[in-house]
């Protein structure tokens, strides 16, 4: 988790990480909770077991204070436990949330086999949850809009002097154009989760509820993007991932009463946008490397736009996976 935070937020995250022990102690006293062990597989947040005064299980979630933390709190307050884990307490300035613990808490991804078996049922379960989370956009002016998210395309262009860096230019052009078309014809906005993928849908009793909302204002069809391009990176290793994506689009369209081509268009555009975000997330790590090189008097590389980690080190960058999904969704949209 610490390595991920430093890569995404740069050296400024070090002070927040170093202060965690004292912050956890203070929160335990302020909220009268007993803080337990951290959960496994941490990435962008510290997530820990907690016990309330009355003995109920809870979750303490901490992350560097930023706008995303504030919008998550706003979304959870609006949900009030309907379709999502209930927010019990929050402190945006300290980047802390105290949440109801969902039991047994198995993520939806655990219902899908290693070759994609069970994906249709998982898609149906996600589709059944989505309308429970969609609410009228009342008193939500502090939440980002679909247009705000779409500015990621502009930031990519600025980063690469009008180009697309390592991303395929024709696909970026298409995604940016399709995003603008869909945005211009969008239905009235609702409160959306914004990141409703298989890892953010947990079993709760006999049903399913969501965690970790981004909090976003947008039309219903926009919500399906995260589900379509996940699970990462397993999806593209399944036999015939294009067929899985096609069935997902059909299930979502029929279950939610949405236009299938619109679902595919949003899914393609958001997959490319996710690739843009992946490059942004890699930038602080590159800056740190450059700073270390300068400190060690290593000759600086030629003045070219900084690229994210690539396959040069034997690993596939996150953006390459997102682009692979986007190409398949574009093909399906063309065939619709």
Image: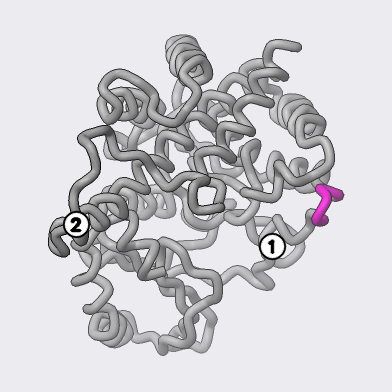
Residue 162 placement, left or right of 136: left
Question: What residue is disc 1 on?
Answer: 203
Residue 324, x across and y down, in percent: 62, 33
Identify the residue at image location x=55%, y=75%.
40
Question: What residue is disc 2 on?
Answer: 298
- Mark 2 and mark 1 in contact (Cβ < 8 Å)? no
Q: Residue furthest right?
A: 117
Task: Indicate yes or no whether the magenta region holds residue 199.
Answer: no
In this picture the colour scheme is one colour
How many residues crowd around disc 1 within 10 Å: few (fewer than 14), some, or many (20 or more)? Answer: some
Judging depth in this view, the residue of 283 and 63 nearest the camera is 283
Regarding mark 1 in the picture, which secondary structure is present there?
A: strand
Residue 138 placement, left or right of 113: left
Q: In the picture, residue 262 is in which quadrant?
A: top right
Residue 93, x across and y down, in percent: 21, 63
Regarding mark 2 in the picture, which secondary structure is present there?
A: loop
Q: In the picture, residue 11 is in which quadrant?
A: bottom left
Range of the magenta residues?
113-117
Identify the residue at image location x=24%, y=51%.
287
């Amino acid at each position: 988790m610490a390595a991920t935070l430093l890569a995404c937020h740069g050296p400024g995250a070090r002070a927040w990480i170093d202060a965690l022990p004292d912050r956890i102690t203070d929160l335990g006293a302020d909220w009268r909770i007993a803080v337990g062990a951290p959960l496994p597989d941490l990435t962008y947040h510290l997530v820990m077991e907690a016990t309330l005064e009355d003995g109920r299980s809870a979750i303490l979630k901490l992350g560097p204070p930023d706008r995303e933390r504030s919008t998550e709190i706003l979304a959870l307050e609006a949900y009030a436990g309907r379709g999502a884990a209930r927010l019990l307490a929050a402190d945006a300035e300290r980047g802390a949330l105290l949440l109801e613990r969902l039991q047994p808490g198995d993520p939806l991804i655990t219902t899908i086999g290693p070759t994609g078996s069970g994906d249709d049922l998982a898609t149906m379960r996600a589709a059944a949850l989505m309308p429970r989370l969609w609410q009228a956009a009342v008193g939500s002016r502090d939440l980002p809009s679909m247009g705000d998210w779409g500015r990621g395309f502009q930031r990519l262009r600025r980063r690469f002097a009008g180009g697309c860096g390592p991303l395929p230019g024709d696909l970026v052009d298409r995604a940016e154009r399709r995003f603008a078309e869909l945005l211009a014809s969008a239905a009235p906005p609702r409160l959306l989760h914004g990141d409703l993928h298989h890892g953010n849908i947990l079993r709760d009793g006999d049903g399913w509820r969501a965690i970790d909302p981004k909090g976003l204002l947008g039309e219903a069809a926009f919500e399906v993007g995260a589900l379509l391009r996940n699970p990462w990176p397993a999806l593209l290793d399944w036999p015939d991932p294009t067929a899985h994506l096609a069935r997902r689009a059909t299930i979502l369209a029929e279950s939610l009463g949405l236009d299938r081509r619109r679902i595919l268009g949003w899914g393609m555009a958001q997959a490319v946008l996710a690739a843009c975000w992946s490059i942004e997330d890699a930038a602080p790590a590159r800056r740190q490397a450059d700073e270390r090189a300068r400190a060690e008097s290593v000759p600086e590389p030629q003045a070219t736009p900084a690229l994210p980690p690539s396959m040069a080190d034997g690993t596939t960058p996150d953006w390459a996976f997102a682009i692979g999904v986007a190409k398949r969704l574009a093909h399906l949209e063309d065939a619709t």
